[in-house]
Image (spheres, rainbow, N blue to C red):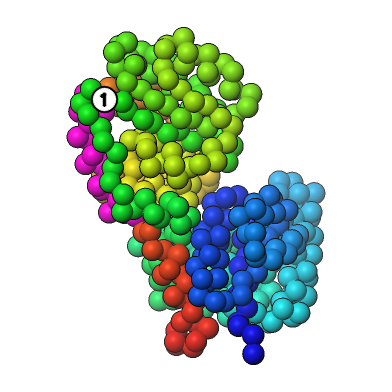
Amino acid sequence: MSDPLIILSAGGTGGHIMPAQALALDLVSRGYRVEMVTDSRGMKYAELFKDIPLHEIKAGTLGAGIKGKIKGALDLGLGIFQAKALLKKKKPAIVIGFGGYPSFPAVYAAQRLKIPTVLHEQNAIIGKANEMLAPKAARIASSTPSLRGLEEAEKIHTIFTGNPVRPEIAALYTKPYPKLEHDGELRILVMGGSLGAHVFSEVLPEALAALPADQRARLHIVQQCRQEDLEETKKRYDEAKINAHLSPFIDNVAEELEHCHLFIGRSGASTVAEMSAAGRPAIFVPYPHHKDQQQKMNAEVVSDAGGGWVMAESGFTPEAVLARIETFLQNPQVLFSAAEKARECGRPDAARKLGNLVTAIMSGWNE
């Protein structure tokens, strides 16, 4: 008899894909067969799942206007039809969904076919897709100790596992915070999320250029930057004589994290989880246009524990950033203390804990 098949369902952005990849690696290491259901956007991350079969299905959100809602509903219906046919053929033992509308068709189809399902929620507040699927899920795995937005009956079935991070990031948990002398180099990693937010390219060069020359000479910046902002942003750093390396995409995030003293960026769930697992203090600037303010809630889990700082985009001004960076340069102990608090929030074993939960449910131990 072949090993049980586990199907993961995730798509859309890296915030949903990365935890799925981390869990896939854990389950494969246990000897399980794993396959992945995703949408066209998720297929762009295919290189992360080299030895795992991927199945592309339709997925849609209910967009703006009547036409947008009709198209979204049709795409969603087609995705459910495709997922149901796939699950009937594959006969998985369990289906794991990672939130977002691309995960909905496969999990919904599994529930209709009486296949056990587990939902993983990356954010501090449950998303719409997971909220709709929660009543029939065997378990809900949360990334934070207190997942908001759940009905009372669903809280009973919720288990805190943490948010799975890539193994190379999890490995940083046991490595010490980089040496930072009082007059030594301060290395800052800047990432703007999947869209490479323009605000960082606009504000940071102006803020850092206002530092005294001796303090500017101590800075080492590695920054993700939109292609269209790259030339102008580099010019502004060069004029200020600041050592800055800019790129539209940072491939070696774990390596950069290992050597950086401070992270500045958005606060998507995976980003917050990775900063915590690595034990890196952060200035989080939440994406301001989510209706439920999920990024703000994600960041506050760490900032409330003393592991970082949250700055609203409206307050992320050159003057405000300058004041913070000057504090860090003059008193590095602030960063050391925040690094320890950030590490205390880290869950480098989240993939293993989620894998244990999946194994328990397949074995019938969750009753």
In the picture, which quadrant includes the C terminus? bottom left
What residue sits 36% from the left and 13% below the top?
A: 210
In the picture, which quadrant includes the N terminus? bottom right
Task: Using the image as rendered, state which of residue 154 and residue 92 is in the foreground.
Answer: 92
Quarter holding residue 189:
top left
The secondary structure that dominates the magenta segment is helix
Residue 148, x across and y down, in percent: 42, 60
Residue 212, x across and y down, in percent: 30, 11
Residue 59 visible, this orientation: yes
Whether 166 is drawn above or below 32: the answer is: above
Whether 238 is drawn above or below 138: the answer is: above
- The stretch of residues the image draws in magenta is 328-346
- Give the labeled residue for mark 1: 184
What residue sits 72% from the left and 78% below the top?
A: 90
Residue 36 visible, this orientation: no
Give the side of residue 75 with respect to residue 212, left or right.
right
Within the magenta stretch, is there residue 340? yes
Give the side of residue 189 with respect to residue 304, left or right.
right
Task: Using the image as rendered, state which of residue 253 and residue 201 is in the foreground.
Answer: 253
Q: Mark 1 belongs to which amino acid?
A: Gly
Residue 161, x across and y down, in percent: 40, 66
Q: Residues within 10 Å of mark 1 (few under 14, many from 20)?
A: some
Give the side of residue 303 with respect to residue 116, left or right.
left
